[in-house]
Each structure stands twice: as structure tokens, then as C-alpha cells.
Image: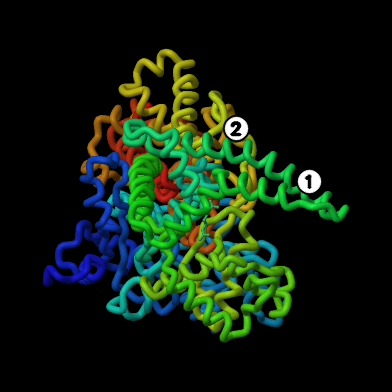
Amino acid sequence: MGHSMLSGARRFSGYFFSRSPLITVRSNSSSPFRAAIAFPARSRSLTTMASESLPASVEALSLQSTTQKSEYPGCFPSLNPMDIYREHIATELSKATGIDAQKIYSRLAWTNTLDKGDLTLPVPALGIKKNPAELCQELASKFPESDLVNPPTAFGPHLQFFCKPKALTDTVLGRILKEKAAFGTNGNQGLKDPSDPSKGQKKIIIEFSSPNIAKAFHMGHLRSTIIGGFLANLYTVMGWDVIRMNYLGDWGKQYGLLANGYKAFGNEEALAKDPINHLFDVYVKVNHIVSEQEAPIKELKEQIKQKKEKNEDVAALEAELAKLVDASEDEKARRYFKSMEDGDPEALDLWRRFRDLSILKYKQAYARLNIDFDVYSGESQVKKESMANAFKAMQDAGVAEESEGAVIADFTKHGAKKLGKAIIVRKDGTPLYLTRDIGAILERDEEYKFDKMIYVVASQQDLHLAQLFKVTELSGRKDLSDRCQHINFGMVKGMSTRKGTVKFLDDILNDVGDKMHEVMKKNQTKYEQVENPVATADTLGITAVMVQDYTGKRINGYDFNLEAMTSFEGDTGPYLQYAHARLCSMMRKSGLTEEELSSANFDLLTEKHATDLIRLLATYPDTIINASKTLEPVTILAYLFKMTHALSSSYDVLKVVGSEPDIKKARMALYFSARQVLHNGMRILGLNPVERM
Ligand code: ARG
């Protein structure tokens, strides 16, 4: 392979045809399927790991894919154990009854609880004109003897299938122990053409976080960061080529304010040391002046208005007003920003320094959340030319119209009443937030030729994004707007640190880490065993924040509750970490090696607690697929809590230490597999599983 090949292309060829895959997943005795290849996704991250400014936590996710084809669409038995069962049931039931196998396959559903079976067939969904309960009985009686599933049971109109424990255990535990971090991933999902891997991976841009330089990093930015990071991981383990993009608020009059403020209050040393905080301080100071200057200006305007009503002479007052306005920080900022727009090199130099230094700091904060952006774009990066082109397309399509000297889009005239009207170009000819987004969407399409683009932005901006997509569609680019999606989320109330209001990401994370440290100290004996309590508290704190955020559906807001999120009780981040650390400690105490576990005799895992846990582990790959449909982190989080609850009720029944050697080994293999699945799920959620705490 030539060195000039793009890394993406090189990665792709390694994906399916590499002769030396990192892990080769061998076939399992109970399954007729072969060869899945696992490799670390985003090889780019491996190089990032070496860069000194980022902690090693930003590491690559694993990914596996297969060259095998199934007659059922989206069915990958060599990657997903449940697909073996769906394929088996559909084929056998079809043979026995003559019902279309594809139809059966597509109707087979998950169950919410294990007592309802491992898979269920809602018989009415087959669309056969017969009494459903009777039909269900009939299908149950016709289903043949099978090595994989017990004779199905009719439950009302549902045909319930229970996997036979032995084959399921061998497949599931055997695979997890072999595939490790790749278990549950499915690179085939992200193929452009599932039948022809050589056409490559689908490309997705995920735009998230997008804070505004020199302004506070508020809860909207934090949620966007956490949710966007999750989505990026999710698409990665589904085999998409993911571009993580940060669209900074890095342009506009506020940079004029900031630059002038910096000249008055700035300090090189402070800027170099802590650019984000220093620039924020400068911005606050200069804004204070702006608001002080506003009052007399407003008063003067009011006086002029009143005098005019009485037909009195206002020339003197108007001259005074002009003087005040001219000398105001706000007007100076406007002029400064104009010089930036006009390309003044000195003004741009200073702005670029602010921007670069801020990005450097952001990068370190993001790394604490396991996030590393591919692109730092921003409002400043949108070319005038793209905005002009977009504007022309809007005019040609009759979407743009003049209104009181400005140019607007009146959506009410284009079948979208709810979207109202939006200004596209201001009276003074300057573009707006929306105008830049319209230019940017076209630029991104040109530059990246993406298959999909997601904007992770608070629901407060629902209207903005709806207008963006509608303008795009109305300008003749429905092909583009159809590929874009707004992933929104609700508000968070009460985010403040104990020292005051939050300004930046680091403040939030440090504060939660401190609180976590206090909580840990309450259990002195345990605390003393922790090797590096400060670092552990930091990781647990970050987990606490993220898990709280993931706990409900995205659209629901929540209260930022430091007490609740840092508790070890209930479904919290610390609880999840504790479950992981406990499994790691069990493995250490067992004295067994990973190698030894692969020769465990799974036949010894006969207790209901063991088989139920295995049944849950079997559904992990389906959970990831489901999450890729809901795009809700809670889909994975709820699964992990369900699984860890099953785990904790097993500890007393399935003891490891003190058991007879073969049993000990088999149980440890089970627990180790559960740990692996917990680890994999946590990693997709962007969490760093801890090994001790
Ligand atoms: N910087 C914006 C804000 O803080 C969010 C940007 C969202 N993305 C976009 N393409 N408009 O409100």
C-alpha cells in the first residue's frame, strides 16, 4: 500500500482484507459462522494518545466486522449472538409453516423482562387472518425440535422463545472472552453499501459542544458535549467514519469588545497562563462599562423623543447623544469588529491568538471527558463567498425578500407557518447567526461529502435549526437538508459550584471531583485502600456528572444535583464505577489469569442467577443497535443498570473465592465477561471505567 493513500482509505482496506488483523475472532463450536475481524476504530486517536497535552484516557474504541452474509437484512450472526437465534427461528418456523421467513425475521422482537422469553413473536404482526391465540398455539406445536431453543410457548397472541442455556452460554461467554472490547460492535452497520464493503464507510459529521469564546461554558454546552461525545462513540462502534466538529462562537462584535477590553485590562502573563479565565474576566469588565454607558444614552434618547413630540428643538441634545455614542465601548467594539471583517491584519492577529489559546485550553478540558475533536470550526470560518452563494440560491428560489431595508425569509409564505420569519441580512448588510449556518451547511457538504450530519444543540434553538433546514430545502437542496438532523435536549437547572456560578467546564468537573473526594472520605477504611484518591475522585466525579445527564431522555431537563449524583446509592455514576471496580478486584483476588478463563468449563454454570446473567449479556449487542436507532444514551445506561443489578444479586449465590477450582474458574469467567460488557458499554457512554476505588 502506497504511503500517499489517505489514512481513511488505508484503514478501510485493513478493515475487511487485512491479513494480520489485531484480533481474529474464531468460530464458535455452536455457531456455523466464521471469522469476524476486530481492530481499533479511529486509528487517528492512537497518535493523539502520544501527544503530551492530552491524558492517555482519550484512547481508541474497538470495532469488529464480518465478511459473512446472511439472507436476512441487518443480520450478522458472527457479530451478534441474538442474530443466530433470530435467523434460526425464522428459518425453522418458515420451513414448518410456510410463512415467509423474512416476515418472521423482521417481526421477532426483544422482551423487556427475561420471564417473557429471549425473543418473542407477536403473532398478529404476521398479518394472517386467523384467531391470533389459536394461530399462536398452532405455530408453537409445529416448531421443530431444536438444539438452540426450547419448544416455544404460546402466551396469548405472543409466541415466546427461550434459548437453551448450554449453547447460549458457550456462544456468549466464548465470544466475550475472545472479542473483548470489540464485543457488541458492528462495523457492517456503517457500510455505504452493505453488500459491497469496497464502497467504504458512511461518513457522519457530528457537530457538538460549540461554546462561545470569552463567554461562559454553560449547561447547554456541557450537555451538548456529553451527548455529542456519546453519539460520536456510538457511530464509531457501528462502523461509521465519524468527524467530530466543534463550531465555536468565535466571531462577532463581542471580539471587538474583548480586544478593546484587553488593551485596557489585559495582561500577557495572565493570558498565557489561563486564557479562558483571563479573557472571560476581561469580557466581564468591559461589559460592565458597556452597561454603565447604556443608561445615560437611553435617557438622552428618551428626552429627545419627548422633545420631538412637543416639536421642540433637539439639535443640541442630538449632538450630545452622537458624542456619547461615538465614545462608547459598544460603538468602539462595532468599529473594531468592522476592521476584523475588513481583514485588518493587526486586529485579526490578536483575535487569532485569543482563539488559538482558548482552543488549547478547551482541548485539555475535553480530554477529561474522553473527547477529542477532529475539527475546530466556528462562525469565523464561514466564508463570505459561501454566504453569498447561499443568498443567491435563496433569491433564485424566491425564498429571500426585502423588508424594511433588510433581507428576510418569510416561512409563512412557504408552507411553514410555525417557522415565522427570519432575518437573513441586516439593514447594514451584515450577516447573522443564521446566515453563517446557512453558509456553513453548504461548505460542509462540499468539503466532506457526508452521508449524515447531526447538530447537537439545546432545544432552545429548535426554531433556529428548523429554519436552517427549511431554508436549505427551499433553496433547492432537499437532498442536503434530508441528511441533516437536530439532536436536541432539555435544560438543566441549578448548575452552580459551591464557590459561585460556573464559568467553565473545568470548574464544573473540579467541583464535582472535590465533592466526590469528600464522599469517598466518609468511608475511611475503604478510602485508605485507594491508591490515588484524588485522581479516582476526579474520574468518579466526571462519571457522576455524565451519568446524571444520561439518566432521562435527552429532551427532559433535570436539576443539577451534586448530592444525588455523587451518591453510591441508587442508579448513579459512582454505583456503576463501583460495580466495575468490584469485578476487577474479584479477578485480582481469584488469582486467575485471563488466559486461564478461556479454558473454563461453562457447563458448571447451571444456577438460574448464572443463566439469567448470561441471557442479559447476550442482549448487549442488540442494545447497542437499539441505541443507534433511539440515539438516546439512556438506552445503554438503563441496560447497564439492569445488568449490574442482576450482578449484585448474584454475588451471594455464585461465590468465587472459596469455591472448588473448576467452579471458581467458570464463575470467574462469567464475572469477567460481565465486567467486559460493563466496560464496553461505559466506554461508548464516554466513561472511564476504574479498576480500583
Ligand atoms: N455557539 C452556539 C451557542 O452557544 C451554539 C452553536 C450551535 N451550532 C450551530 N451550528 N448553530 O448558542
**If you read the primary sequence from the N terminus, does the residue marked by circle 1 or circle 2 appear first?**
1
Task: Name the amino acid, label 2.
Answer: Asn
- Name the disc covering residue 303, or none: 1
Looking at this view, name the residue that lies furthest to the bottom.
396
Which residue: 65% across, 68% down? 422
Q: Secondary structure at mark 2?
A: loop
Using residue 266 as the reference point, say whether residue 634 is left or right of it. Answer: right
Can you identify the residue that label 2 sits on? 561
Say which quadrant the C terminus sits in: top left
Q: Position of residue 496 (x, y in %)?
A: 57, 31
Residues 519 and 605: in front is 519
* Vertical relation: 606 (above or below) 272: below
Residue 126 quadrant: bottom right
Color style of the picture: rainbow
Which residue: 37% across, 28% down? 536
Residues 147 and 609: in front is 609
Q: Is mark 2 within 8 Å of ligand 1?
A: no
